[in-house]
Image: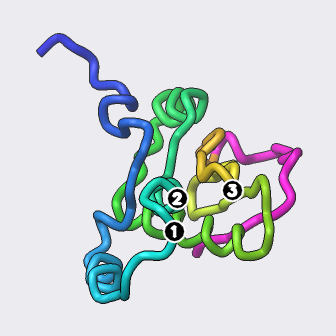
Amino acid sequence: MSDRMMIGHLYPGKLHPAALSPERRTASASSDAPKGNFKELLNENLLRISNHAAKRLEQRGIEIKGDQLVQIQSAIEKAAAKGSKESLILMKDMALIVNIPNRTVVTAMDGNAMKDNVFTQIDSAVIIS
């Protein structure tokens, strides 16, 4: 038990928020035949966390819970619908920069790191209350 628990052990790089949401599971189970091939469906429903973001989550003590994952996935879908490429997702006490086409969290900040900070190289922001 002397092994350290690191963020990579908790979040294996690809997270599927639909597995955490019972209403989403029932909606997908009741839908007609899926459109597109398996790889396309898989890639559009996953949330990836880059190595850099995983390190920042660990350093800053940020924990992403199941309901937050669903909110983040919803925010990514909204940004993608508007044609966003790089988006800032603001939650109560954290901010995430997400590459929308790849559905990858690029970096993460807690409330303290957000203060007096300038966010660059983004083309949209989604605010989750």
Q: Nearer the viewer, residue 2 or 101?
A: 101
Question: What residue did someone put label 1 on?
Answer: 36
**21 displayed left or right of 110:** left
Say if 31 sits above or below 121 in the image.
below
User: Which sits earlier in the primary sequence, circle 3 or circle 1?
Assistant: 1
Question: What residue did someone put label 2 on?
Answer: 40
Tell me the quarter of the image containing the N terminus: top left
Query: Dot 3, how many residues are within 10 Å of its Cα: few (below 14), some (14-19), or many (20+)?
Result: many
**26 displayed left or right of 90:** left
Where residue 45 sits in the image (x, y, percent)?
47, 61
User: Image quarter for residue 90?
Assistant: bottom right
Looking at the rendered structure, the number of numbered marks drawn on it comes to 3
Viewer-nearest of discs 3 and 1: 1
Here the colouring is rainbow
Where residue 28 sits in the image (x, y, percent)?
34, 80
* Three-letter amino acid code of the residue under disc 3: Ile
Question: What residue did someone put label 3 on?
Answer: 100
Q: Residue at x 49, y 69 (%)?
A: 71
Q: Secondary structure at mark 2?
A: helix
Question: Are the two marked residues, 3 and 1, in contact with CB atoms closer than 8 angstroms?
Answer: no
**20 displayed left or right of 70:** left
Q: CA distance from mark 2 to mark 1?
A: 6 Å
Q: Nearer the viewer, residue 19 or 55?
A: 19
Query: Would you say the magenta stretch is mainly helix, strand or loop?
Result: loop
Query: Dot 2, how many residues are within 10 Å of its Cα: few (below 14), some (14-19), or many (20+)?
Result: few
Question: Are the two marked residues, 2 and 1, in contact with CB atoms closer than 8 angstroms?
Answer: yes
Where residue 115 sits in the image (x, y, percent)?
75, 47
Query: Dot 1, how many residues are within 10 Å of its Cα: few (below 14), some (14-19), or many (20+)?
Result: few
On whether residue 90 falls in the magenta region, the answer is: no
